[in-house]
Image: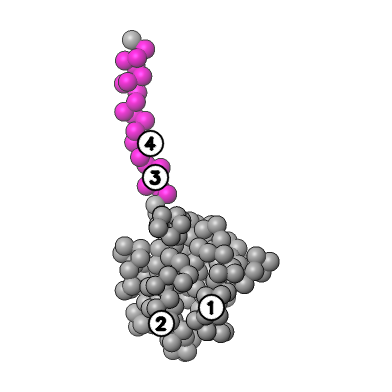
């Protein structure tokens, strides 16, 4: 009898379990406030708080699955470097590239690509920001937790535009040229 009671209760537990992962997969959306997370620039000692970065300013953030990866290095980052002046002419005060990498890798990638002062190279070392905005993905081939590829316009801490690649990795809606055309 006790076993029958437990079996009877088990189906009632299933919806609660299946509901929790659905909450986890929700991502930030237009109108949401940016989470308050520290990213790192150049070294682990130089923190850049996301709320402070965007307070009272228009900031264009774009994220890549990984520094030095082919699509990111040949297309995504160079597009933002080449279009930085045009983007800033639209009233954007800062452009930031975010990746789940360490700050030394991000700094070296920025130097290699000659970003200069056009783009801030910000490391999300543990993926805390990426998970907080719900735009994380598991890419085992790149080491596990990585960011989906996206661009996000933030105005005074609120998301006003969000362009997430449909498969998280592609090179279409989040490219600089496509983001610029929507500013």
Q: Earlier in the sequence, mark 2 or mark 4?
A: 4
Q: Which residues are magenta?
A: 2-24
Q: Mark 1 against mark 4, which lies toward the viewer? A: 1
Picture residue at 34% right of the left edge, 36% below the top: 15
Q: Examine the rendered structure and indicate whether residue 28 appears above or below residue 160.
A: above
Q: Which residue is mark 1?
A: 110
**Residue at figure coordinates x 45%, y 66% from the top left:** 66
Q: Disc 4 vs disc 3: which is toward the camera?
A: 3
Report helix, strand or loop for mark 2.
Answer: helix
Q: Main secondary structure of the magenta part?
A: helix
Looking at marks 4 and 3 on the same chain, the residue that comes earlier in the sequence is marked by 4
Residue topped by disc 2? 79
136 displayed left or right of 7: right
Separation of residues labelled 2 and 3 (CA atoms): 35 Å
Q: Is residue 31 visible?
A: no
Question: Which residue sits at x=65%, y=65%?
Answer: 44
Residue 5, horizontal then vertical, whole percent: 34, 16
Question: Looking at the image, is mark 1 or mark 4 earlier in the sequence?
Answer: 4
């Amino acid at each position: 009898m006790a076993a029958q009671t437990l079996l009877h209760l088990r189906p009632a537990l299933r919806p609660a379990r299946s509901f929790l992962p659905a909450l986890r997969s929700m991502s930030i959306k237009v109108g949401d406030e940016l989470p308050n997370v520290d990213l790192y620039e150049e070294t682990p000692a130089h923190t850049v708080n996301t709320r402070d970065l965007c307070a009272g300013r228009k900031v264009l953030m774009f994220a890549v699955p990984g520094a030095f990866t082919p699509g990111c290095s040949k297309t995504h980052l160079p597009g933002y470097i080449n279009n930085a002046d045009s983007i800033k002419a639209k009233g954007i005060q800062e452009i930031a590239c975010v990746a789940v990498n360490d700050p030394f890798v991000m700094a070296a990638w920025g130097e290699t690509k000659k970003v200069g002062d056009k783009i801030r190279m910000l490391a999300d070392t543990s993926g805390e920001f990426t998970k907080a905005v719900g735009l994380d993905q598991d890419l085992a081939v790149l080491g596990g937790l990585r960011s989906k590829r996206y661009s996000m316009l933030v105005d005074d801490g609120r998301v006003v535009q969000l362009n997430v690649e449909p498969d998280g990795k592609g090179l279409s809606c989040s490219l600089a040229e496509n983001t610029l055309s929507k500013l």
